[in-house]
Image (spheres, rainbow, N blue to C red):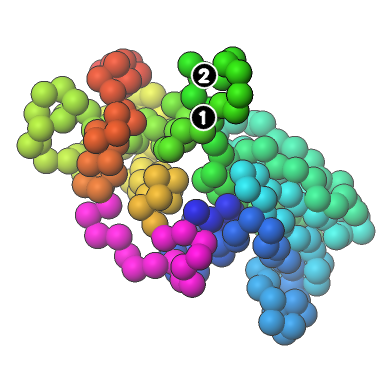
Amino acid sequence: MYSIIVVPAPTTPPGAQVRLAPGERLRFGRATPYAAAGRRHLDIPHPGVSRTAGEISATGSHWALSNFSAASTYVVENPEGAGEHIKIAPGRVNAPVPFEFSRVVLPAGGDLLDFSVWAPRHDYVERAHAAEDGEPTALAFPLDRSKRYFLVLAALCEARLRGHPHAPLPTVEQIADRLRPLWPAVNRASVQWNIDYLAVKLRLKPGPETAGAGPRLNGKKESLVSLALRFDLVREDDLATLAQAR
C-alpha cells in the first residue's frame, strides 16, 4: 500500500495524485529543479511561494515535513480535529506529522495556499491482545471509528445490517442527508471524497509497487460494502452512532 498520498486540490483526479511509498520524498515549491533532475516535484505556481519551499518524506505509517523557507511558518491542520494543528517553523527539517488527514497551509504574499496529504497506513493494534506478551497483532483493515469516513461506511452498510440484504445502496446524496444531523457541513463532494479515501484505506486500490494510480474502480460502493460486511468491519452495534442522526 502507498504510505502517503498527496492531493494537490480537492478536485484532483486519482491519476494526478502523488503516491509515495515508504522512503520516498517529494519536494514542493514554485520552481521545478528537482523535476528537471528526474525527480518528482509538486508545482505551486505562485510568486509568493519559495522556489524550493519544502519537502515531504514518507515513512511506513506517517510522514514528515521539511520547511525550506527562510521566513514563513507552515501550518499543518487536521481537518477533522476541531482546530488541531501543528506549526513547522522556517528551516525545520523532518518534522513528524501525526494526522491521518492533513491540510498543509502555506502563506504566499496575501494568500493562503494549501494541499492535502493522506496517510492511509495509520495502523491500530488489536486491543484485546495489546497487553499480552509478545508483539501485538496489527489489524488487517485498520479503521478509526471516530473518523468521518467510518460514518460514511456505516451509512453505506446500514440497510443491509438492518436485515435487508438485497437493499439498493444509498446514493451519495442520500448518505449526505442521513449524516447531516451528525455532520452539518456534509455535502455530496465530502461524501464522495470519503468513499474514495475508503477505497484506498481498505486496499481496493493498487499498492505502491504499481506504476500508476490504477484503473478506475467500478462499483466502488458495492465493493466497499461487500468487504466491510464480509470481514465485520461494520457491525450492527456500530449503527448506534447513526441512531443519533434520526
User: Could you say whether the residue bearing mark 2 is in a helix, strand or loop?
Assistant: helix
Q: Which residue: 21% across, 47% down?
A: 222
Q: Which residue: 25% across, 48% down?
A: 223
Left-right relation of 148 to 92: left
Label annotation for residue 129:
2
Labels in figure, total: 2
Provide the residue designation for mark 1. 137
Measured from the top left, where is residue 161 in percent x and y? 19, 26
Left-right relation of 74 to 130: right
Question: In the rendered structure, are the residues bearing label 2 and label 1 in contact, judged by CB atoms less than 8 Å apart?
Answer: yes
- Residue flagged by tag 2: what amino acid is it? His
Q: Which residue: 48% across, 16% down?
A: 128
Magenta stretch in the rendered image: 206-220
Image: 231 above or below 221: above
Q: Is residue 31 visible?
A: yes
Measured from the top left, where is residue 11 in percent x and y? 46, 60
Left-right relation of 83 to 176: right
Question: Residue 77: which quarter of the image?
Answer: top right
Measured from the top left, where is residue 98 in percent x and y? 67, 38
- Residue flagged by tag 1: what amino acid is it? Thr
Q: Which residue: 49% across, 24% down?
A: 126
Quadrant location, the C terminus: top left
Q: Is 117 contained in the magenta span?
A: no
Q: Nearer the viewer, residue 122 or 26?
A: 122
